[in-house]
Amino acid sequence: MIPAISLEITVLLLGLGMLLAESFSKSEDKSGLAHTAIAVLAALVGFSFFANSDVGNLAPFYVADAEALFFKRIALVTTIVVLVMALEYRQTLAGLVPVERRGAGLGEFYSLPLFTCAGLMFMASAVDFLLIFVSLELVTISFYILVAYMRKNSASLEAGVKYLILGALSTGFLVYGITWIFGLTGETNLDAIARIVHTREIAPMPLLFALMLLLIALGFKVAAAPFQFWVPDVYQGAPTPITAFLSVGSKAAGFLVLLRVLEPFVSLPGIGEKVLALVAVLAGLSLIYGNLAAIPQDNLKRLLAYSSIGHAGYLLVAVASWNDGVSTFGNARVAVAFYLAGYLLMTLLSFLIMIVVANHSRGDDITHFNGLARRSPFLAFGMLAAMLSLAGIPFTAGFFGKLLVFAAAVQEQRFALVSIGIVTVAAGFYFYLRIVAAMYWQQPNDDRPITFSFLTRLTIGGLAAAIFFFGIFPQPILTMLRKTPAATQVQVSH
């Protein structure tokens, strides 16, 4: 058994080592750094299954329960695939980063995702507002740099400025909300806050105000409406690997923090039902806006950007259906975790194939996928798997994730959200299957075959296989989550 925190420390040390190697290396080829990082992160995924849940003196700030370890694995796997994307993307990036020699500047592009990964892993274990804030800032600052990394590209610079301004604004809401809760309870530890709010008389209005501020801040992080205005432009302007990282990693950590922050309050009389009602409103708005706005999009990156807002809506449906059930079906926390795992597979697969196609077609519009099945049947099948899962077709991970979400909503009688969800799923069939139609039914714009590396082929094949495997056999993921404790009820003594 190894200490759980050694996973984060290893990732941080690896990132620092890669920055030093980049600084002193005279080689123009930096791909060795990315391959080294991929190998080490893959080893850490294996070691995470032997992590010790005993965290000793870190207990007030840090936990290593099954839920935290599951989200650490999500962060590690996401970073591995992002680095594979970065290797495919290096030719595009090299032409858009002002450097004195070819290959310079790529080392930092391979290193910075490791710091983002470490921040996401710390967030997965954070049970104190101080560690939550520091971890979130490590993630956010890394993303500020990565989003604007293509300094010769005006769209990337615009995306970086928008993300910086709105990210700083959301951080202000987060700090203000934490300050209010500290002022009301005198604590920053979530377990201590839970005990205090259930055993002391605290004015409900200031507490609701503080929770509203936190929901606004986290709503920005998970791209929920009406805090989604940054998403389309930032997703389209950022380097494609970073867009994928934003879409998956940031959303996964944001939802885990949301679950941990809300846990002390959802069972509080007069507070919990109001907070969950507000989450339900955000869920409905995200479902409607995200899915309807995706319908007219012709650019695949913008389509997936609006789609991510819709998927945030499905996840918020599960959060709004909070319960303390111990079974798989109807358990909101299990629904959120499984949905995020499936979302990781299908979104990363979509962006990885998009990078490969864009390298050969010089664009990421849907029309650039015309006739892809003739140029590369393997890529077309991979994108087909991703689109079917995003749409929620049976026997895919996306379908089972939606099934768990709707089961939790039905159990808590959130029938309005279920109705909206069913309608938006139907809308998703249209814009996702547009890409399938372009690949299989349209004439190709170019007859040249598409070539890519063996590592990329292996990653695409693995992601596509996992989508179908976990859609048919979800038990491995559910087993990892089975040890996750349900929301803790604090008993009030009379």
Image: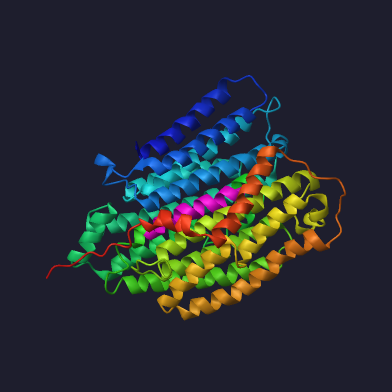
Is 25 displayed left or right of 56 in the figure? Answer: right
User: In the image, is residue 250 part of the stretch drawn in magenta?
Assistant: yes
User: In the image, is residue 362 part of the stretch drawn in magenta?
Assistant: no
Front position in the image: 466 or 432: 466
Front position in the image: 382 or 159: 382
Residue 226 visible within the image: no
Q: Quadrant of the N terminus?
A: top left
Q: Residue at x 59, y 43 (%)?
A: 82
Is 292 displayed left or right of 333 in the figure? Answer: right
Q: Residue at x 83, y 53 (%)?
A: 374
Residue 415 visible within the image: yes
Q: Position of residue 396 (x, y in %)?
A: 59, 62
Q: Is residue 21 above or below residue 241?
A: above
Q: Residue at x 26, y 55 (%)?
A: 191
Q: Position of residue 95 (x, y in %)?
A: 73, 36
Q: Quadrant of the C terminus?
A: bottom left
Write down the region rendered in magenta: 243-259
Q: Is residue 264 above or below residue 135?
A: below
Front position in the image: 116 or 68: 68
Residue 420 occupies quadrant = bottom right
Q: Position of residue 295 (x, y in %)?
A: 69, 68
Q: Residue at x 37, y 51 (%)?
A: 66
Predominant SS along the magenta part: helix
Is 380 displayed left or right of 141 in the figure? Answer: right
Q: Position of residue 50 (x, y in %)?
A: 38, 41
Residue 369 occupies quadrant = bottom right
